[in-house]
Image (cartoon, rainbow, N blue to C red):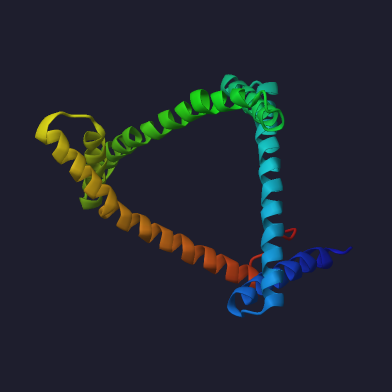
Amino acid sequence: MDRLTKRTLPTAVAVAAGLLTLIGYLIPYPVLAFARDQLIRWAVIVAAFAFVLGFFNVLEVHLRRITRRRPGGFYSAVLILSALVTLGITLVGSFSAPLRPLNDWWFDYILYPLQASAAGLIAFTLALAAFRLLRGRRGGEAFLFLLGATLVLLGSLPLPGVAGAQLAALREWWLTVPSMAGMRGLLIGVGLGTLLIGLRVIAGLDRPHSEP
């Protein structure tokens, strides 16, 4: 198989799959809808295998860091050990009913508290980023960013009295009105960018699936 075929065949398959999926949504015909749903199922299966490959790629990268004695090898070892233990407990709990409480205990008392701790650090990280932003660039955007981070931090504290209730209400307003408006703008931008990338792939302008 020559170089031209290696580049043309994946592009042709990607363009055909994209057009068939798009037509299946635009034209309500049973055969087209069936082909669309089948392609989406295949894409989900490929994405699942991609997650598995990504897991092994993370293990490979951190194992290489440990074997080559690069900085951060201890944290790489902790990550590998945690990933393997979590995988083992999940598999054992999925296939063995008597050991399923161990799986639930691992998620309830290990993984979920770690996720909550990481989520709790987001507000402090935003506040620190706002202060650094003010040191480097002082403007209205930086002030609004600092104001929002401060309101979220203060409103999350269990302060007593009327002040605590007002801060909690102000935090709720900030999260539901200005923050939600910004989030919707970001989501619209992401949707338009995804649509543009999809159209470029269907048109054959971008070929991430073919060899360079």
Q: Which corner quadrant of the image does residue 75 belong to?
A: top right
Residue at 46% over, 32% down: 115
How many numbered discs sit on the rendered protein?
Answer: 0
Residue at 36% over, 60% down: 185
The N terminus, quarter of image: bottom right
141 or 83, nearer to the observer: 83
Residue at 46% over, 60% down: 190
166 or 16, nearer to the observer: 166
Q: Is residue 138 visible?
A: no
84 or 190, nearer to the observer: 84
Q: Where does the image place residue 11, in percent across and percent down from the top left?
A: 73, 67
Q: Which corner quadrant of the image does residue 3 belong to?
A: bottom right
Residue at 66% over, 41% down: 54
Q: Where does the image place residue 56, in percent across and percent down from the top left?
A: 70, 36
41 or 152, nearer to the observer: 41
Q: Where does the image place residue 92, in percent across and percent down from the top left?
A: 69, 27
Q: Where does the image place residue 159, in percent across and percent down from the top left?
A: 18, 29
The residue furthest left is 162
The C terminus, quarter of image: bottom right
Q: Is residue 13 visible?
A: yes
Q: Which corner quadrant of the image does residue 86 belong to?
A: top right
The residue furthest right is 1
